[in-house]
């Protein structure tokens, strides 16, 4: 399912909800374990996992962006800076597996916003494929399809 956009006090939130047939602990490992992170997001690594700790983004040019963790509850909540915005993962156990909310708080929409949202969407699909031990989705094709959807969603939202 595509993200839901909603105005909030800190900007707009884009919320993507996913249900996994796996425990919150198993999903959490993909969000925080440096052996599993590269399987779904090659540029991302975890640093010290705590409020005030950081995640690291490899810019691919020899530089790294350190993104402060602003909220952290083990196996449940991970929120960190994402450029000028924030990205938050919320996990909970539900019957038959777990439920994840990815919530990106967007202060200002840019041309890059639909690209980020499409990227997060595909990343969550890749996590599901990895957990299910399926062949991961073709990221490029999946991203192109989601980018079209998110471009239309953002345009509709901004024009409403």
Image (cartoon, rainbow, N blue to C red):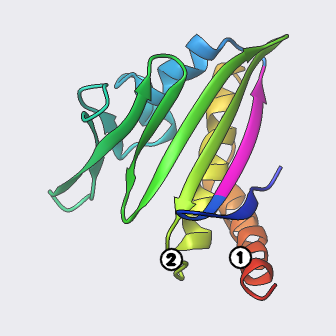
Identified at 71% across, 56% down, the residue is: 142
Q: Is residue 30 left or right of residue 51?
A: right
- Residue beneath disc 1: 154
Q: Is residue 57 above or below residue 149?
A: above
Q: Label 1's element?
A: helix
- Residue beneath disc 2: 108
Q: Is residue 55 left or right of residue 28?
A: left
Give neighbour class at mark 1: few <14, some 14-19, many 20+ (Cα, 10 Å): some
Give neighbour class at mark 2: few <14, some 14-19, many 20+ (Cα, 10 Å): few
| Magenta part, dominant SS | strand
Q: Is residue 126 above or below residue 83?
A: above
What's the CA distance linking mark 1 and mark 2?
Answer: 12 Å
Identified at 45% across, 40% down, the residue is: 79
Identified at 72% across, 69% down, the residue is: 150
Q: Which residues are magenta?
A: 14-20
Q: Residue furthest bottom?
A: 159
Spot occupied by residue 74 in the image (x, y as percentages of width and height) = 45, 17
* Image quadrant containing the C terminus: bottom right
Q: Is residue 138 above or below residue 63?
A: above
Spot occupied by residue 16 in the image (x, y as percentages of width and height) = 71, 47
- Snapshot quadrant of residue 62: bottom left
Spot occupied by residue 73 in the image (x, y as percentages of width and height) = 45, 22
Q: Nearer the viewer, mark 1 or mark 2?
A: 2
Q: Residue furthest front?
A: 9
């Amino acid at each position: 399912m595509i993200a839901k956009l909603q105005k909030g006090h800190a900007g707009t939130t884009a919320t993507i909800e996913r249900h996994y047939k796996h425990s919150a602990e198993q999903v959490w490992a993909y969000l925080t374990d440096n052996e599993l992170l590269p399987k779904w997001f090659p540029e991302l690594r975890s640093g010290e996992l705590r409020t005030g700790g950081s995640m690291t983004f490899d810019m691919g040019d020899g530089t790294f962006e350190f993104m402060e963790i602003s909220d952290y509850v083990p196996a449940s909540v991970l929120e960190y800076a994402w450029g000028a915005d924030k990205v938050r993962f919320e996990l909970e156990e539900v019957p038959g597996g777990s439920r994840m909310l990815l919530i990106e708080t967007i202060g200002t929409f840019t041309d890059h916003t639909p690209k980020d949202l499409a990227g997060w969407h595909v990343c969550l699909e890749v996590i599901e494929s990895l957990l299910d031990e399926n062949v991961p989705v073709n990221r490029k094709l999946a991203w192109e399809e989601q980018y079209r959807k998110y471009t239309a969603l953002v345009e509709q939202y901004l024009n409403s």
